Image (tube, rainbow, N blue to C red):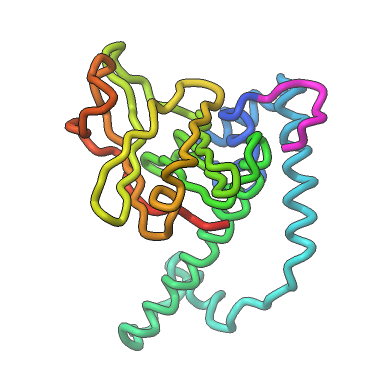
Amino acid sequence: MSQNQSEYVPPAEDLLAAEYVLGTLVGEEREAFKQRMHRDTVIREGVQQWESQLGQLAEAVPEVSPPAQAWGAIEERLGWREAVPAVGFWASLRLWQGVSAVSTAAVAVLMLLLVNTSPLKPEMLYLVQDQGKTEWIVNASYQQGRVAMQAVNPPSLPQEEVCKLWIKSEDGTVHPIGILPHEGEVTFSIEALRNQLLSVDAELMVTVERRDRAENLPPVGNMVSQGKWIHL
């Protein structure tokens, strides 16, 4: 999202606007957002900016014709004609690989555009998600030796609990990074440990911990997210 926008759009609203334009916001959530968009000029301008940015990306992608069997598969799914017997495991695998590739491409576009709002020039990214909703964006710059944690749509927790980010280096050591913010963005310097924490083998974890638990103690709470860096 461009920084010269006349009004500030909170990250959660900006994400919804991007999902609305991408078409990944569906059902009741899409209808509710559409109603808010009609009433709120700032949200409407945000949607228009996403349409402009994503439209340029779409124009840069060459047109690809769908496979000949695509319409037949849709008709079968709708019950308009009898299903053709499956032709085996590998055909099914190729179908799901295609669906996965489309979904991954949409998410990748969304992530790359969202991190433009960060003061860092990130080279790697991690999304903290729950049931398909992005709660935080974690991005990092190896050159700057910093990690940024940006709140998008954080969950509601009891007052005494927080979500905490950890990075497990290749040697198995778990390093506390910090408490994930409930709004805005927080950055941490990891310059002394960037080789370990920003490597391809590093593992990111988010756990729910007691707020008063000492920072240097290892995680003991429930793990709510786990994965690796996505290198941009």
Q: Residue at x 54, y 76 (%)?
A: 70
Callout count: 0
The C terminus is located in which quarter? bottom right
Q: Percent position (x, y) of residue 123? A: 58, 52
Query: Is residue 101 inside the magenta stretch?
Result: no
Q: Residue furthest front?
A: 192
- Along the viewing direction, whichever of 77 and 46 lies nearer the viewer: 46
Q: Residue at x 78, y 65 (%)?
A: 60
Left or right: residue 222 compared with residue 198: left
Q: Percent position (x, y) of residue 88? A: 32, 86
Q: Residue at x 53, y 44 (%)?
A: 140
- Residues rendered magenta in the picture: 1-9
Occupied quadrant, residue 213: top left
Compared to residue 184, the image places residue 25 above or below, namely below
Q: Residue furthest bottom?
A: 87
Q: Residue at x 68, y 76 (%)?
A: 64
Occupied quadrant, residue 157: top left
> Magenta-highlighted stretch: main secondary structure?
loop
